[in-house]
Amino acid sequence: MKFIKRLYIENRFYYGAVGVVLLFLLSFIVEPLFSIAQLALFILLSFFVLDILILFFVRRGLIAQRELPDKFSNGDQNPIYIRLENHYTFPVNVMVIDEIPEQFQIRNFKIKRKLKPSEISTVKYELRPTERGEYHFGKLNVYASSFMGLVSKRYIFSDKTMIPTYPAFLQLKKYDLLAISNNLHMYGIKKIRRIGHTMEFEQIKEYVQGDDIRTVNWKATAKKNQLMVNQYQDEKSQPVYSVIDKGRVMKMPFDGLSLLDYAINSSLVISSVALRKQDKAGMFTFSKKVENIVVAERRNSQMNLILETLYNIETDFFESDFNRLYVDIKTNIRQRSLVFLYTNFETLDALHRQLPYLKAIAKHHLLVVIFFKNTELDSLINKKADSIQEVYDKVIAEKFAFEKRLIVNELKKYGIYSILTTPQDLTIDTINKYLEIKARGLI
């Protein structure tokens, strides 16, 4: 029974069988073809049996192993490796069919390779998950066939495996090194005008070209008989909170991910950057009530705590209660903090309903409201209109896009900072705003 389950007849055998049948049919018209058809049938069956023998004579002619990461990064390309070993004494054609988690809905996955005798090869492919949670891999199926290609032998490897998908932790590596080296403003990530100096003194050092001459320490200069300047550093230990709206406004999809998942990914990165800059990082979420609270701290385990909390965020996308958010912030956050509020406003009316609570939060904390551009509207605005209906649609789209800019001005009127960004630029724009606030010494 095991032999039958592992034996697969290839198309080449069926093509040969069809050819033999045609020869037998033609032999009714041309009688000499009957002997040729019999010979062809004998040759086909002989090669068929021979192919089976050389493939199944070696018990473990092929070994394969799937190599998975400990966890997937949501929204990123995650590499998966399959290691193939050919233990046959002849070249084999290999077809790999991996049972990929159902979330990807990939039904035609197939990788083909040709392995030389005793060759070891590694196959790589990538998967991009678009939602957090558990991803279950099935079996790893590998089909080996010889140069005759009449049959193939099925090998089954790797038991079922579960891989959790966390917020986009792979993005952390992109920014961590820059944060450590104090160069987050480089590489096109940040372009700001640094205003003034923070008052946290670090050291006195020799003047080099490019130093601000306003920081010259004249007493130290007189003692050393050379120019000496004071060096300052950004103030540290400032609480930085990422507040994520889990309401219905964050359900809108973009490139497979919801706005909520983009906010979660950005919160993870900004928390890491804040800790690298010696600030305290914390977070919480809200919809009908405030949940997933992580108090702002600066400790070794803080990033793991934030990562696990972001992974476990669940929501039914209810209507968000900003009044409850204000009460909890006032009750639980005593120290003046930088608060990044990830939400979305589509109209001025939607903003005005929540504006009293945002103003109340901004009285005690530095509030940055982050909301999203509708990229579909931009494509509609830039599209040439060829009919009255398209002109009408374009005008409506321009109206909604203009309202987004009005929301920015309305928030600015009350001293509330804002970021209007596209989902794909959310992380970089948030880091830029954080660095700008640090450079200006606003917290």
Image (cartoon, rainbow, N blue to C red):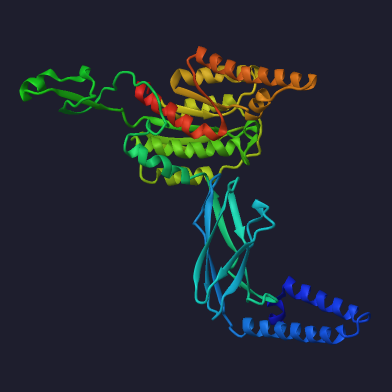
Horizontally, residue 85 falls left or right of residue 401, namely left
Horizontally, residue 237 falls left or right of residue 271, namely left
Residue 81 to residue 91: above or below:
above
- Between 373 and 89, the one nearer to me in the picture: 89
Residue 79, percent across and down? 52, 54
- Between 82 and 33, the one nearer to me in the picture: 33
Residue 220, percent across and down? 10, 23
- Between 153 and 40, the one nearer to me in the picture: 40
Q: Residue at x 63, y 20 (%)?
A: 401
Residue 127, percent across and down? 58, 52
In which quadrant of the rendered image does the C terminus lie?
top left
Q: How many labels were placed on the picture?
A: 0
- In the displayed orientation, state which residue is furthest to the right: 29
Residue 239 to residue 81: above or below:
above
Q: Residue at x 53, y 73 (%)?
A: 116
Q: Residue at x 78, y 83 (%)?
A: 40
Residue 382, percent across and down? 65, 24
Whether residue 291 is visible to the viewer of this picture, yes or no, is: no
In which quadrant of the rendered image does the N terminus lie?
bottom right
Residue 259, image quadrant: top right
- Between 256 and 349, the one nearer to me in the picture: 256
Residue 90, image quadrant: bottom right
Whether residue 34 is visible to the viewer of this picture, yes or no, is: yes
